[in-house]
Image (cartoon, rainbow, N blue to C red):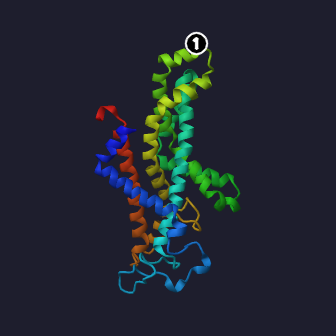
């Protein structure tokens, strides 16, 4: 822990990335209290305020510093609420992928044999497809299998599962490789000799020693999950329009980009890039800090 703190203090990039991440995450989590307006309150919307430019531009409204969209919603408020959804979906999808991948990686590496071969062949097949196609496939199957009237209600859980399933492989392969090394060490052999069951050995002895690389992957994967969610929402198969994420806001603004209302898509795009870049930089620093060869 002291080494991590020292490495963090010595890295201006990590400090800047952490500050940006805190600002983005804090603004998203505290959106109900910090946002100037509630963009999801239909009673407060005024179509007469639609397409208002940013406050510093001619004809801009002082009450809407980043302007308004086609429904009169404040852009700054929609970004804060949209980032809240994007972060929630990304974090939940990473947690789902982590649990699934770590479980399968432990079973594959510790048990070996046909179980190992079966799990790894599934992983190899999935790696032959882009993650976005896997997510689209899972989302499409769920929409066909589930009742149409419930699509909006279950859109976010389905999106979480779709993104999670598309990203479990890297966790499974990493944990499998580490487990193959750890299961032949003396402490695992000693646990077998005293009669501890395989499940207890995997959870109590092997798992804590393979989680270091997993945490680094999870940090970087959060940014990937946010991008995947934004891509799906931009394509119109993500979260419902009534609960727009950053990807949905960019898609909505893209329809008016050529007509001059650039702020509707530019500012959500900047927010998405800033959030993903800061999380990626933090993940890169954490990977380097935990690598003893780079110390």
Say above or below: 268 vs 106. Answer: below
Is there any visible trace of residue 30 in the rendered image? Answer: yes
Say above or below: 261 vs 207. Answer: below
Is residue 13 or residue 139 the one in the foreground? 13
Is there any visible trace of residue 107 in the rendered image? Answer: no
Say above or below: 44 vs 172. Answer: below
Counting from the top left corner in percent of width and height, residue 166 is at: 52, 45
28 left or right of 278? right
243 left or right of 249? right
Secondary structure beneath label 1: helix
Counting from the top left corner in percent of width and height, residue 72 is at: 51, 79
Quadrant in the picture for the N terminus:
top left
Counting from the top left corner in percent of width and height, residue 275 is at: 41, 58
Counting from the top left corner in percent of width and height, residue 80 is at: 49, 66
Residue drawn at x 38%, y 42% as measured from the top left: 286
Q: Residues within 10 Å of mark 1 (few under 14, many from 20)?
A: few
Q: Residue furthest front?
A: 2
Is residue 111 or residue 202 the one in the foreground? 202
Quadrant in the picture for the C terminus:
top left
Residue drawn at x 54%, y 55% as measured from the top left: 88
Residue drawn at x 50%, y 43% as measured from the top left: 167
According to the picture, the residue beneath numbered tag 1 turns out to be: 193
Q: Quadrant of residue 32 in the image? A: bottom right
Residue drawn at x 49%, y 26% as measured from the top left: 179
């Amino acid at each position: 822990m002291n080494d991590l703190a020292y490495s963090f203090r010595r890295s201006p990039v990590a400090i800047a990335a952490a500050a940006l991440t805190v600002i983005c995450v804090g603004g998203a989590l505290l959106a109900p209290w910090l946002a100037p307006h509630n963009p999801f309150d239909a009673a407060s919307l005024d179509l007469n305020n639609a397409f208002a430019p940013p406050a510093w531009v001619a004809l801009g409204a002082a009450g809407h510093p980043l302007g308004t969209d086609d429904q009169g919603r404040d852009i700054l408020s929609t970004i804060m609420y949209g980032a809240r959804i994007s972060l929630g979906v990304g974090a939940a999808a990473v947690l789902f992928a982590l649990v699934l991948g770590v479980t399968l990686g432990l079973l594959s590496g510790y048990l070996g044999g046909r179980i190992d071969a079966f799990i790894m062949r599934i992983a190899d097949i999935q790696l032959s497809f882009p993650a976005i196609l896997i997510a689209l496939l899972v989302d499409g199957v769920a929409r066909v299998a589930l009742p149409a009237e419930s699509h909006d209600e279950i859109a976010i859980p389905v999106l979480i599962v779709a993104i999670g399933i598309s990203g479990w492989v890297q966790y499974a392969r990493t944990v499998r490789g580490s487990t193959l090394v750890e299961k032949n060490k003396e402490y695992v052999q000693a646990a077998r000799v005293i009669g501890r069951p395989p499940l207890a050995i995997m959870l109590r002895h092997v798992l804590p020693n393979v989680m270091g690389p997993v945490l680094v992957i999870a940090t970087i994967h959060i940014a990937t999950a946010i991008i995947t969610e934004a891509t799906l929402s931009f394509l119109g198969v993500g979260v419902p329009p009534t609960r727009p994420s950053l990807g949905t806001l960019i898609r909505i603004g893209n329809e008016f980009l050529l007509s001059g209302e650039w702020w509707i898509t530019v500012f959500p795009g900047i927010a998405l890039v800033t959030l993903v870049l800061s999380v990626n930089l933090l993940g890169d620093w954490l990977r380097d800090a935990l690598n003893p060869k780079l110390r």
